[in-house]
Image: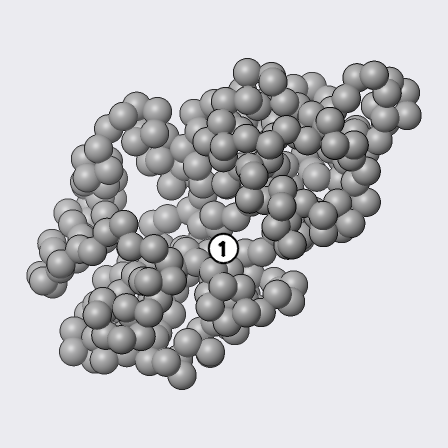
Amino acid sequence: MTVQYLQKKGFQVQPQTNIATVISRNAMINKQIDMTWEYTGTSLIIFNHINKRMSPLESYDTVKRLDAKLGLVWLKPAEMNNTYAFAMQRKRAEAENINTMSEMVAKIEHIRQTDPDNNWLLGLDLEFAGRSDGMKPLQQAYQMDLDRPQIRQMDPGLVYNAVRDGFVDAGLIYTTDGRVKGFDLKVLEDDKGFFPSYAVTPVVRKDTLEANPGLAEALNTLSAQLNNDVISTLNAKVDIDHQSPQQVAREFLQQKNLL
């Protein structure tokens, strides 16, 4: 999407894709690449080693200030937060009136007390289950008691299918994944604010912005088009309908009169 839009605006663009996060970061600092879309949570936690709980605005302000010292400029963040969340089948969540994580935990505890043979099953990817900032502190934050048989560890991509097909009662997902909308899953509100904010934002080298008048405005215009609903719809066209990312991006930009 960025390549097509910036080329239309008259910028010369050379895309570099499939670069690992840390390598991309180093390439930005070493002037090997000029811009990227980055998540506030990634910069805060992975690059700057800050694990303090912050609001989305605090996270953005912090990484913007710290990365400015490295010559990296954070432009306007999209209203798109690609963080972790738990999701359920929508029809079941609505039938049982479960809208938040706390309500899910209350349901788990109610079943534990009244029907101990009927385990509530949670689908998790292997990484989150074992991470120091993953399942254990989540359980502490929400006072969620689970027995090991209640946790089903699986490949991240299989969690969505497991929730859709009822193999687990709820599962850990990424909020902008196309299968959330494609499988009609309900994302539960993280009402205790456990998961960090991962607001996607264009990050550009300061010298690149100075050498390319209008680039910041163009990227901010693009960023303003994106939110969780938009990106999950576009992702579903790629992940479920098997359209090419280039085709989906082009059609979206045309609909927004940006091409």
Side (left or right) of 205 relative to 106 = left
Q: Quick check: 8 above or below 46?
A: above
Give the residue displayed 83% in from the left and 23% down from the top: 111
Residue wearing tag 1 = 198
Q: Position of residue 91 (x, y in %)?
A: 61, 19
| Outermost residue toward the bottom in this view | 69
Q: Quadrant of residue 77?
A: bottom left
Q: Nearer the viewer, residue 153 or 89?
A: 153
Colour setup of the view:
one colour
Q: Nearer the viewer, residue 212 or 238?
A: 238
Side (left or right) of 220 relative to 13 = right
Q: Quadrant of residue 35?
A: bottom left
Q: Position of residue 215 (x, y in %)?
A: 21, 68
What kind of residue is marked 1? Answer: Tyr
Give the residue displayed 56% in from the left and 39% down from the top: 126
| Label 1: how many Cα within 10 Å (few below 14, some 14–19, many 20+) | many
Q: Position of residue 209 (x, y in %)?
A: 23, 75
Side (left or right) of 148 relative to 72 = right
Give the residue displayed 46% in from the left and 78% down from the top: 66
Q: Position of residue 89 (x, y in %)?
A: 59, 22
Q: Is residue 90 visible?
A: no
| Outermost residue toward the right in this view | 113
Q: Quick check: 134 above or below 56?
A: above
Count of numbered labels shown in the rendering: 1
Q: Quick check: 58 above or below 178?
A: below
As helix, strand or loop, the secondary structure at mark 1 comes to: loop
